[in-house]
Image (tube, grey):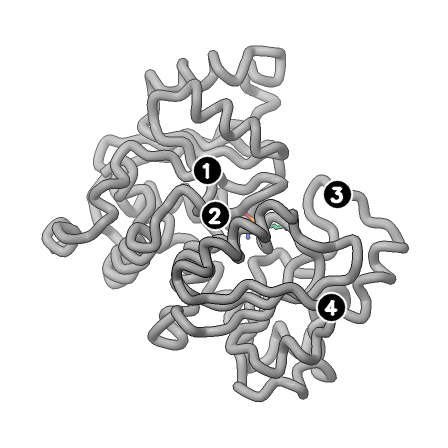
């Protein structure tokens, strides 16, 4: 049934492809993945990857990404291997390129969470199997697939909706801008000076958005942004690998998503956060634990979106 539904879906073209950033995927491919994720969500066991293996390298901690990828492979009839870099020869100086080539002889895809985007690119260059970016300093595409799925489920549509991203601009902000631009969703970024997104990624997302009728804008007024928002999104003020300083926290404090700010919302928006969250910093407990929060649906959708992705890349 799933195979039949896939016949006219653009994701048929994704076989063997990497996912390094959503910028490399078309709007049709992203929508196709969401459609497949919706189908796979209906039944937990869908043996589409029997005998297939996913190698997972984590150079930063993870709860959701690790568990959802591992469970995704199990529910698809395949297998996932957790590879701790400290236990790999990578930790003793074996090159990324050699590691990529060797792993490609065993596994059907490699997922990596690391620091520099260049490392994921190098791995992909050396590998003969698809490489999936499980988060770098610059991007977090798998999270955004799950987020788009969640928005589609909550509103029935994504195009034309408006997401206000408030706080520190990081890997999440970048991938959200790119993903939204591809599927025609507006994004308003609200951050203090010094916490803005990469100018290059912002410019590229704006350009993509022009083609899908969406608007990607930058402001420093949280009130103005929440007034028109369907989705209010925030993320940690200190990402993995960044240094938490008191100056940084002070600068970001006026950008906390709390009841006072929420009172300016006119559209009864949903609240989103990729998690892990720091209650009392980027979001107050009353908001993240309140009735408009969909953070655990997002976390669950990591599983469904990644099952779709894995099926499309190596099924
Ligand atoms: N959102 C997310 O990627 O969570 P983990 O860091 O727990 O994987
Ligand atoms: N911006 C966060 C996302 C965690 C999933 C970080 O990189 O730590």
Marks 4 and 3, how far apart at CA: 22 Å
Label 4: few (<14), some (14–19) or many (≥20) C-alpha neighbours in 10 Å = some
Instruction: Tell me the tag on residue 141.
Output: 2
Q: Locate residue 12, reporting x and y percent.
A: 20, 44
Query: In what element is the residue under mark 2?
Result: helix
Return the x and y of residue 16 as percentages of the image width and height.
Answer: 29, 32
Mark 4–mark 3 CB contact (< 8 Å): no
User: Mark 2 to mark 3: distance in Å?
Assistant: 20 Å
Per the model, the C-alpha gap separating discs 1 and 3 is 21 Å
In the rendering, which numbered label is found on residue 242? 3
Circle 1: element type: loop
Residue 300: tell me if it is visible: no
Vertical order, 260 against 239 (above or below): below
Return the mark for residue 20.
1
Q: Which mark is residue 220?
A: 4
Disc 3: residue Cβ within 8 A of ligand 2's nearest atom: yes
| Sequence-first tag of 4 and 1 | 1
Name which of mark 2 and mark 3 comes first in the sequence.
2
Secondary structure at badge 3 equals: loop
Query: In the figure, is residue 303 to the left or right of 279?
Result: left
**Quarter of the view holding residue 156:** bottom left
Q: Whole-Å distance between the Cαs marked 4 and 1? A: 30 Å
Find the distance from the CA under tag 2 to the CA under tag 1. 8 Å
Residue shown at the point (41%, 39%) measured from the top left: 19
* Residues marked 2 and 1 touching at CB (< 8 Å): yes
Q: Quadrant of residue 273?
A: bottom right
Q: Secondary structure at mark 4?
A: loop
- Mark nearer the viewer, 1 or 3: 1
Closer to the camera in the image, 36 or 77: 36
Near-viewer residue (292 or 61): 292
């Amino acid at each position: 049934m799933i195979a039949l539904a896939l016949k006219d879906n653009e994701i048929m073209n994704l076989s063997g492809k990497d996912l390094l950033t959503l910028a490399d995927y078309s709007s049709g491919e992203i929508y196709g993945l969401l459609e497949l994720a919706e189908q796979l969500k209906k039944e937990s066991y869908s043996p589409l990857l029997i005998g297939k293996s996913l190698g997972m390298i984590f150079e930063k901690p993870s709860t959701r990404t690790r568990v959802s990828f591992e469970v995704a492979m199990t529910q698809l009839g395949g297998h996932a291997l957790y590879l701790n870099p400290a236990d790999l020869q990578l930790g003793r100086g074996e090159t990324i390129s050699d590691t990529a080539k060797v792993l490609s002889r065993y596994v059907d895809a490699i997922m990596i969470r690391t620091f520099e985007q260049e490392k994921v690119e190098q791995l992909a260059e050396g590998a003969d199997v698809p490489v999936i970016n499980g988060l770098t300093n610059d991007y977090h595409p798998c999270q955004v697939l799950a987020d788009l799925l969640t928005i589609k489920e909550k509103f029935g549509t994504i195009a034309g909706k408006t997401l206000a991203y408030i706080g520190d601009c990081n890997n999440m902000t970048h991938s959200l801008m790119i993903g939204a631009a591809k599927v025609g969703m507006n994004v308003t970024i609200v951050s203090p000076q010094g916490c803005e997104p990469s100018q290059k990624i912002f410019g590229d997302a704006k350009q993509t958005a022009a083609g899908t009728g969406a608007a990607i804008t930058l402001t420093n007024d949280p009130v103005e942004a929440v007034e028109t928002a369907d989705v209010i999104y925030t993320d940690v003020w200190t990402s993995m690998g960044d240094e938490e300083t008191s100056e940084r926290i002070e600068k970001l404090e006026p950008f906390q998503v709390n009841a006072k700010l929420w009172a300016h919302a006119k559209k009864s928006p949903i609240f989103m956060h990729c998690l892990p969250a720091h209650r009392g910093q980027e979001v107050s407990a009353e908001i993240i634990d309140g009735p408009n929060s969909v953070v655990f649906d997002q976390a669950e959708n990591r599983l469904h979106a990644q099952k779709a992705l894995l099926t499309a890349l190596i099924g």
